[in-house]
Amino acid sequence: MSAGSRRIVEGSQPPLTYPPYKSGALRSPTRPLIKLAGDFSDFAAPVYGYHAIGETDADLTRQHAGEPLGERIIVSGRVLDEDGRPVRNTLVELWQANAAGRYTHVVDNHPAPLDPNFTGAGRTITDDDGRYRFVTIKPGAYPWRNHTNAWRPAHIHFSLFGESFLSRLVTQMYFPADPLFAFDPMFQSVRDESARQRMVSQFDLSLTEPEWALGYRFDIVLRGRNSTPFEART
Ligand SMILES: [Fe+2]
């Protein structure tokens, strides 16, 4: 899953620099990239440690003494390669804001309440069908000061590991028909409309559990013409 082995269609992946995404400017290279021997310095995402996956790691509503506030949802899908084959036994991690649009993070000072029953981090391993499944809370939109009145559409961050740490892929999952899509430079940095739609989950009645939670399907394609847009190609 190295960058060199993936055929990238013009406009289907976010560029390293996208001027409307202002806070990305300081994180974007202004000079040609230099290839370094791989290390961990380019992680753009939380690192959860190396202990075994626990029983509640994939259920973010059961990680504390009480239930978190907000709308319980199920997020599930398959991790696929460019030929549609399942990618098995792959570590899928997610992190997200709570229902009020606040991260459990020291630099998040958005004046929305934290939820003592919600950390917003989860992980699981794909099964033989390449499938993963999380139970979580639908995240809220949050402001991010990129420009006046800038709000991120509700989203869940995903990270996938390949066979080694150097093949970590990071992307964001959105929810259908979010009115903030048109105003979000991060979403819009993927210029190809069909590629953008590959970041949007689909409501799925078959994943929805009666009397319990709505289900959203989000398949992730690691490479090829139908690849999911990724933030980091390590
Ligand atoms: Fe976020």
Image (cartoon, helix red, strand yellow):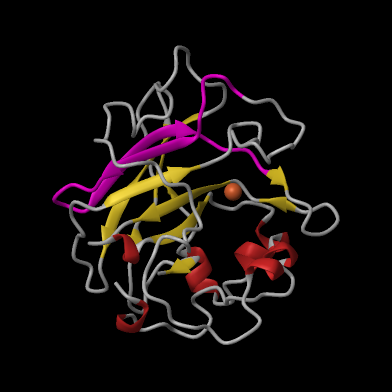
Q: Position of residue 196 (x, y in %)?
A: 53, 67
Q: Residue at x 53, y 36 (%)?
A: 138
Q: Is residue 229 left or right of residue 69?
A: left
At 52% from the left and 26% from the top, the residue drawn is 118
Q: How many marks?
A: 0
Q: What residue span does the magenta drawing correspond to?
A: 115-141
Residue 136 vs residue 50, the one in the foreground: 50
Would residue 221 be visible to someone looking at this image? no
In this view, 149 is above or below 59:
below
The quarter of the picture where the N terminus appears is: bottom left
- Residue 63, given in percent of the width and then of the height, sits at 41, 23
Residue 217 versus residue 13 in the image, above or below: above
Can you say which quadrant of the picture contains the C terminus? bottom left
Given the current orientation, which residue lies at the most extreme right position? 148
- Give the residue displayed 56% in from the left and 19% down from the top: 116
* Image vertical order of residue 158 relative to residue 36, above or below: above
Q: In the shown orientation, is residue 9 left or right of residue 16?
A: left
Q: Is residue 215 visible?
A: yes
Front one among 43 and 181: 43
193 falls in the magenta region: no
